[in-house]
Image: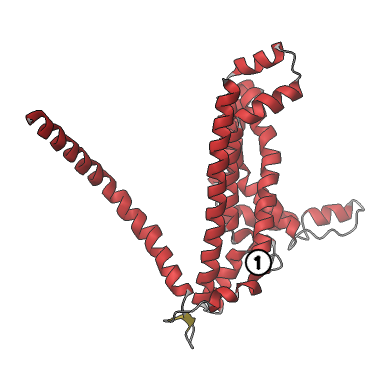
């Protein structure tokens, strides 16, 4: 009986210690995530005050007006999906080379991939304004006889900025996944008569699916909230939801409408994260089955 009481007391102390250790993180999570989301939700159900800002109300008018910002949502979704796909198409071969073929040059190449992060995101984007501007690539192309090519303030310029800035976030998860790949599985595949393409399709790609999905989420989620790249390289002609939120909160001061747009954007990102978790769990199951 005494041992049972001691065991119960030990479990109680363990739970108390666990709760104490989690308290700072839980308070931080509540203060910086849950409370702002609640404020956004309350604001989204309100009305715009006559002088701008928020006026208490309980209505869904702000959500019903969201189709007026459909272009911003459409641009954000297709540019985020396209940018993620381009980062994958460029990053996978690079990560594969770094993990399997780089040899003694691996460390140097990894440092070169990291180097862009040593400078400000804003400065890197400004640099592309110069490169893609009229005095950059278009001037060189015109000098070579190709005529005038408009690059800046176009979807192409925004996509170039997205791929350049977010490519490292795709490369590193893929590199880690490919670097940890059991080389014996590749050798077994070749011994069984599979060619390089078949080995890549049946062994390498499935086993690197976790890194692929992680990289896709690390790229897709920040692009969905992107503001700087479309503002600088799009010149206001390529409008993202982030640009719409800045306009609604700071220019027109329509906080309830901006809050409604932000809530919908968060829901879209949550849907993407849920899809990622499901695909990740399936990839894990399929990987275990293929290994067995």
Which of the colour schemes (rainbow, by chain, secondary structure, one colour) is used? secondary structure
Report the front residue among 194 and 228.
Answer: 194
For image coordinates 60% across by 72% down, the residue present is 66
Residue furthest front in the image: 1
Q: Quadrant of residue 41?
A: bottom left
Q: Quadrant of the image for the N terminus? A: top left
Is the residue 146 above or below the residue 194 in the image?
below
Is the residue 160 above or below the residue 31 in the image?
above
For image coordinates 64% across by 72% down, the residue present is 67
Residue furthest bottom in the image: 50
Q: Quadrant of the image for the C terminus? A: top right
Residues packed near mark 1 inside 10 Å, few (<14), some (14 to 19) or many (20 plus): some
Report the front residue among 144 and 124.
Answer: 124
Residue 87: give x, y in percent of width and height: 67, 44
Q: Which residue is mark 1?
A: 72
Residue 279: give x, y in percent of width and height: 58, 41
Q: Quadrant of residue 216?
A: top right
Is the residue 35 above or below the residue 165 in the image?
below
Report the front residue among 182 and 100.
Answer: 182
Residue 111 seen in render: no
For image coordinates 52% across by 54% down, the residue present is 270
């Amino acid at each position: 009986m005494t041992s049972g009481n001691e065991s119960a007391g030990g479990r109680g102390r363990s739970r108390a210690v666990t709760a104490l250790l989690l308290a700072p993180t839980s308070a931080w999570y509540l203060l910086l995530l849950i409370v702002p989301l609640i404020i956004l939700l309350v604001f989204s159900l309100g009305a715009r005050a006559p002088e701008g800002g928020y006026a208490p109300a309980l209505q869904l008018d702000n959500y019903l007006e969201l189709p007026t910002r459909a272009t911003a949502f459409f641009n954000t979704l297709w540019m985020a999906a396209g940018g993620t796909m381009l980062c994958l198409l460029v990053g996978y071969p690079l990560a594969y080379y770094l993990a399997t073929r780089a040899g003694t040059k691996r460390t140097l190449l990894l440092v070169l991939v990291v180097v862009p992060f040593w400078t400000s995101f804003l400065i890197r984007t400004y640099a592309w304004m110069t490169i893609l501007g009229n005095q950059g690539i278009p001037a060189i192309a015109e000098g070579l006889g190709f005529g005038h090519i408009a690059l800046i303030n176009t979807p192409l310029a925004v996509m170039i900025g997205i791929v350049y800035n977010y490519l490292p976030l795709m490369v590193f998860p893929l590199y880690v996944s490919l670097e940890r790949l059991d080389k014996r599985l590749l050798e077994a595949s070749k011994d069984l008569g599979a060619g390089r393409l078949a080995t890549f399709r049946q062994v390498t790609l499935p086993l690197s699916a976790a890194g692929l999905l992680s990289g896709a989420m690390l790229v897709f989620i920040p692009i969905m909230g992107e503001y700087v790249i479309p503002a600088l390289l799009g010149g206001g002609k390529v409008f993202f939801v982030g640009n719409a939120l800045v306009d609604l909160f700071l220019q027109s001061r329509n906080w309830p409408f901006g809050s409604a747009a932000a809530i919908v954007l968060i829901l879209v990102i949550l849907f993407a994260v849920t899809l990622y978790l499901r695909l990740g769990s399936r990839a894990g199951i399929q990987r275990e089955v293929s290994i067995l």
